[in-house]
Amino acid sequence: MQQKHILVVEDELAIRDMLRFSLERADFRVSEAEDAQQARLAIADDRPDLILLDWMLPGASGAEYARELRRDELTTGIPVIMVTARVEEEDRVRGLNLGADDYITKPFSSAELVARVRAVLRRYQPGGESETIEMEGLTLDAASQRVSAGEKPVKLGPTEFRLLRFFMSNPERVYSREQMLDRVWGQNVYVEERTVDVHIRRLRKALAPHGFDAFIQTVRGSGYRFSNKPG
Ligand code: CA
């Protein structure tokens, strides 16, 4: 398989070196940029499969640059993981709807970094997501588009199915309504945020007879999370 190419956009040399070391050891090909300007040139020169973008950059901030990457037709299809230094920044990344696919908060282990990068790349690969996902007896089969609770089939509409697939592929993470619209409905679809709530209600209703509605948790002020742990 061809090596995946990761562009690291980070102004601090020590952190860039650390990221490169971790990623190369996991068999990724790495290129580097110190700021948004260098990143634009790097992307034009050699398009990456994923961008690891630092929140704190000189010049155009990581946040501004993330927006630019999403707006630009040439780069909108490249997944972005934001690297933040603090939990408050992580909250802002979530809240701002920058279009980042994931975020990772320093300090993180090399194993965590590689796991996040692989997970995001997998989502972008056609058919790359695992075909059958299971959690405590709730099973979703992507190929046949069937969901079952134990032995019993669960009937879902197409949107609820996509929503559940998204949740089950990304457990234990909080997503804002805007992020969910981007990821489940698609980036160029203009629907209101409350549409998300409507489909969440339908999904919960379909799962409730089997007791799995509790997995879809409302996180006040933030959005929703899929989890088998108590909310
Ligand atoms: Ca930085």
Image: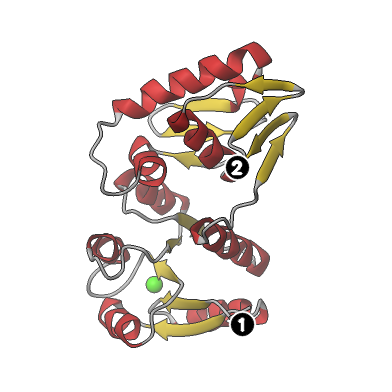
Q: How many marks?
A: 2
Q: Tag 2's secondary structure?
A: loop
- x then y, percent, for residue 206: 55, 17
Which residue does the image show at 44% across and 77% down from the upper left? 8
- x then y, percent, for residue 70: 28, 60
Q: Nearer the viewer, residue 18 or 212?
A: 212
* Residue 146, placed above or below residue 73: above
Quadrant location of the N terminus? Answer: bottom right
Badge 2: residue crowd in 10 Å (few <14, some 14–19, many ≥20): some
Which residue does the image show at 39% across and 38% down from the upper left? 176
* Residue 32, placed above or below residue 200: below
Which residue does the image show at 34% across and 80% down from the upper left? 43
Compute the Cα span from label 1 to label 2: 32 Å
- x then y, percent, for residue 213: 58, 20
Residue marked by disc 1? 24
Which residue does the image show at 25% across and 31% down from the upper left? 192
The three-letter code of the residue at mark 2 reads Ala
**Relative to residue 106, is residue 137 drawn left or right?**
right
1 or 2: tag closer to the N-terminus:
1
Residue marked by disc 2? 142
Q: Nearer the viewer, mark 1 or mark 2?
A: 2
Q: Is residue 224 visible?
A: yes
* Residue 56, placed above or below residue 213: below
The three-letter code of the residue at mark 1 reads Glu
* Residue 31, placed above or below residue 95: below
Q: Is residue 106 visible?
A: no
- State the colouring used for the structure image: secondary structure
Q: Nearer the viewer, residue 86 or 128?
A: 128
**Relative to residue 26, is residue 180 drawn left or right?**
left
Looking at the rendering, the quadrant in which ligand 1 lies is: bottom left
Q: Residue furthest front?
A: 144
